[in-house]
Image: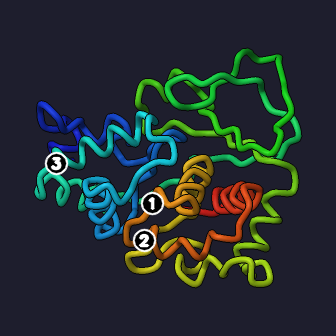
Amino acid sequence: MPQVVSHGRKPDVYACGFCHRADGAGGPENASLAGLPEGYITQQMADFKSGARRSSLPERLPSKLMTAIAKAATGEDVANSAAYFSSVKPRKLITVIESSEVPKTYIAGWFFTPVNEQEKEPIAGRIIEMPKDVEQFESRDTHSEFIAYVPVGSIAKGEALAITGGDGKTIPCGKCHGQDLRGLGVVPSISGRSPSYLVRQLYDMQHGARAGMGGGLMTGVVAKLSEEDFVSLAAYAATLKP
């Protein structure tokens, strides 16, 4: 594990492994980096640095931190971290459950956590993704697993849209992201990854916040998709083997 991943570089480059976890597993509040193409990771850091990759919510702390870190990181920092994370084999950590009701939640540290074990509320078209064990996750345990509650029927809708393109609404995802959406060349895998993260990225691409090389290519792909489509596509992708 490179020094920049385990300890960072004072004063401005935080340890990559603190937020993204030591093996790049990530969480609902950020990206899973494990197994992403080395060139893709390098390009995303360049996009954060240049301002081409932003968030539709400018004050969202994880995105602000990434921009600051990308500006402070050296070429060596980026190269070492990208080589490391791309070499790690991703693991399946997310259980996707279709449900009309979900635990009542509040936001703690940029992720959902249950208010208690009894209270429920309607899912209302959302994805509610949370750690199975909050204490384990907050301890930065790389083995933390997650439950993602998604609307009833969304997985099948997402599968049909991903495979067919929805009669011209978009293009089949596999054309660029490869078989089973596990990546193709420098195009990243989107299988088995956080559905919360995927929805945020689709939204940002549609609204012009991600205008880097990859984000620009996605602009036309997502132009006609609704937020319900985003949820369905993300729910389906999260069920696949990473």
**Quadrant of the image occupied by residue 105:** top right
Cβ atoms under marks 1 and 2 closer than 8 Å? yes
Q: Does label 1 or label 3 sit earlier along the sequence?
A: 3
Spot occupied by residue 92 in the image (x, y as percentages of width and height)? 56, 53
- For disc 1, the neighbor class at 10 Å (few under 14, some 14 to 19, many from 20) is many
Tag on residue 157?
A: none
Cβ atoms under marks 1 and 3 closer than 8 Å? no
Tag on residue 210?
A: 1
Residue 23, above or below 47: above
Give the position of the C terminus as an image quadrant.
Answer: bottom right
Q: CA distance from mark 1 to mark 3?
A: 20 Å
- Front residue of 236/217: it is 217
Q: CA distance from mark 1 to mark 2?
A: 8 Å
Tag on residue 214?
A: 2
- In the picture of the structure, the residue carrying the numbered disc 3 is 73
Which element carries disc 3, helix, strand or loop? Answer: loop
Residue 219, above or below 2: below
Residue type, numbered disc 3: Ala
